[in-house]
Amino acid sequence: MSRRSQRDPAAELTFLQREIEQIFARLASFDHAEHVAAGEWSPPVDVFESKDHLTIVVEVPGLVPEALSVICRNRQLVVSGERRNECVAPDVAGFLCMERPHGRFSRSIALTSAVDVHNAAATLNQGVLTIAIPRLKERRSREIVIPVRREEDHD
């Protein structure tokens, strides 16, 4: 027969509390979504990186180029815009279902690699905004050797 050791209930509760705090901390690190205020929406974004370009793809169906803004500030690419609520026929009493979002949106994408925003291009095609930003060549410095000399003793 093996005997099960008794554990201190207070120690077990402290251990459980610590585990729950760690779980919530891990879950918080996964929350990369930006908080959307009332009347706003958040279009899906994909970011691709290749040898020569950083490509950002944003789904904005129904928007025209004039309704979009793409700005780079503080190493962040900010894509924003607004989809206006389309006018409904005057005889419509109310919506039975309304799933298409409208209102303003703003998405920020961190630019973590060296890119040339001055030569970036943004195109809108069939509701998909594609932003191509050329990557800068790696600026590796040459290796510079600093000679080490022996300090002479002065007596």
Image: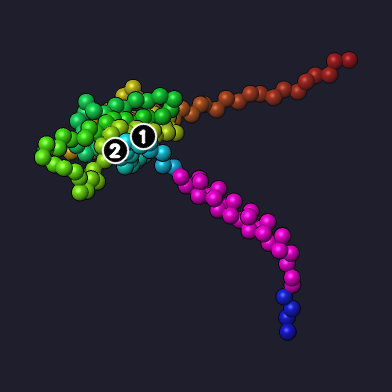
Residue 16 at x, y percent in the picture = 63, 58
The residue at which mark 1 appears reads as 107
Considering depth in this image, is 122 or 143 the residue closer to the camera?
122
Does the magenta segment cover residue 102? no
Quadrant for the N terminus in the image = bottom right
**Whole-percent x, y for residue 97 in the image:** 22, 48
Front-lying residue, 94 or 148 = 94
Q: Using a 10 Å C-alpha cutoff, classify the residue at mark 1 as few (fewer than 14 neighbours), some (14 to 19) or many (20 or more).
A: many
**Percent coordinates x, y for residue 74 in the rendering:** 44, 25
Disc 2 crowd rating (10 Å Cα; few below 14, some 14-19, many 20+) is some
Q: What x and y, as percent, mark residue 118?
A: 33, 22
Report the residue marked by disc 2.
58
Look at label 2 and name its amino acid: Val
What secondary structure do most residues of the magenta stretch adopt?
helix
Residue in the image at 63% along x and 23% along y: 146
Q: Which residues lie in the magenta part?
A: 5-31
Q: Residue at x 74, y 72 (%)?
A: 5
Q: Is residue 155 left or right of residue 103?
A: right
User: Can residue 71 be seen at all in this image of the molecule?
Assistant: yes
Query: Mark 2 and mark 1 in contact (Cβ < 8 Å)?
Result: yes
Amino acid bearing label 1: Arg
